[in-house]
Image: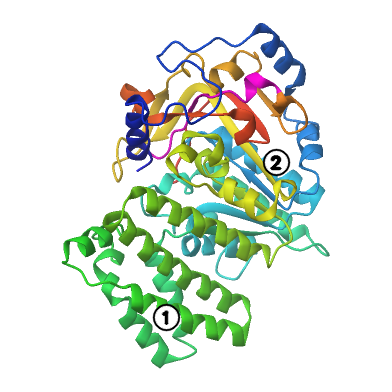
Amino acid sequence: MFARRLTALLVRLAAGVLLGACWPAVAVDGNPQPFSAALIAQLRTHAQPLANDDNDYALLLASIGDARVVMLGEATHGSAEFYRQRARLSQRLIADKGFTAIVIEAGWAPTLPANAFVHGQPGHADVATALRAFRSFPGWVWRNREVAAWLDTLRASNNRMETTPAVSIYGMDLYGLPQAVASVVGYLAPRNTREAARARRDYRCFAPYIDGALDPQLYGRDLARGSMPSCAKRVETRLAQLQRMADQEADTASFAALMSARSIVGAEAYYRTLYTVGALESWNLRERFLAESLRILLTRHEKIIVWAHNTHQGDARATDQGVVGELSIGQLMREQLGDDAVYLVGMTTYSGSVRAATGWGTRDRVRRLRPAIAGSWSQLLHTVGLPAFVLVLRDGLGAQPELTERRLDRGVGVTYLPEAEVENHYVYSSLARRFDAVIHIDTTSALAPLP
């Protein structure tokens, strides 16, 4: 879906529909203006090398200050180093700044076993078992060795905590329809058998899509064709009932069930909108859902860390996303909470390997990640000459005119099509307006999935 969306965007760019509505012009005819030697020298002065020691993130942590929401991006969904650096930085934020929740770009219900694992709950002693909930495509994004090692670390640190709050992990997305339905029914069954039976009936319209036979997004296709009745009213009624129960009980279990019911409502609306209205409207519906998830979790945690792709984490107003009307949670969080409360960290790479599929629902495999194209932001950061470094943009450096220009930036989602890379994986953006800081890892390697 990432590839198809960007393809449509760049086709419109090539047709000239969007040109002239962005930032100061940089050549878009395949011959980008070169970066100045003065800028490259300045970046080398400001770049803080990542040496795998306690000083790695000193400047970044100082720049983050008292922000309540720190959003850690990634340039691909399949590069191991992005996960490792986000884990390292998250641990520093937890230890040094009191963050107590990590929110990931995953479904609410599929993430519940991982949260139970890091809290050491009975029956959740094996990390591989906890990650099996991420069984739908693209399972490797969260069911991999890097995430397993990170959850082991969180569990161990939670076990050591005596007075400080334990750290929780949540999914903010509307994906995971089968697990969400099971979560709601499983919550109701021991409490109210009649309501559990009603919930099963309410969710029966999703039956073809929750038993593994069909992708849940095909609900929207079938609804648009008239071969499937709408589930909207039923799932909204069920959410209202769970809200009343949560208001009365106000415990962790009722909150989890409520959020599962909310994700079902979100998924129904997302898939319906995708096929009956269009991709832009469904994208923005999802971004608003993600932003609302973060606001809800901020009522339970003073500070949260967010893990998601750069496309979500960066400010869409600083990219071609904003030109065509796409939102991002980075933009929404800045607008709703204020710039001082939100800190956006992008992650980039120049070359290496990546785990990705060739199309939605196809098998993932390791692919060679081509060197970033000339004139792109990743190519600029490659010229700094360090294997890995942090570049803080918010505190002065980002005011440099060359860093606010409009240049190509690569984003690889769950699919990678190197034979048509520019059309599918590059968009124009302003680096310093999109992010407050950037972590660049020049050569990255593919994620290792769990069996």
Q: Earlier in the sequence, mark 1 or mark 2?
A: 2
| Residue 50 can be seen, yes or no | no
Q: Is residue 7 left or right of residue 106?
A: left
Disc number placed over residue 362 in the picture, else none: none
- Magenta segment includes 404: yes
Q: Secondary structure at mark 2?
A: helix
Residue that label 1 marks: 238
Marks 1 and 2 close (CB-CB < 8 Å): no
Eye-nearest disc, 1 or 2: 1
- Magenta segment includes 214: no
For the residue pair 40 and 332, the one nearer the viewer reads as 332
For the residue pair 23 and 217, the one nearer the viewer reads as 23
Residue 162 in the image, given as x and y percentages of width and height: 81, 64
Residue projecting furthest to the top:
37
For the residue pair 295 and 33, the one nearer the viewer reads as 33
Looking at the picture, which amino acid does disc 1 mark?
A: Arg
Seen in the picture, residue 125 relative to 317 is either above or below; the reply is below
Residue 165 in the image, given as x and y percentages of width and height: 76, 63
Q: Is residue 106 left or right of residue 125?
A: left
Residue that label 2 marks: 89
Q: Residues within 10 Å of mark 2 (few under 14, many from 20)?
A: some
Q: Secondary structure at mark 1?
A: helix
Looking at the picture, which amino acid does disc 2 mark?
A: Leu
Q: Residue at x 54, y 38 (%)?
A: 310
Q: Residue at x 56, y 61 (%)?
A: 293
Residue 20 in the image, given as x and y percentages of width and height: 46, 26
Q: Which residues are magenta?
A: 400-414
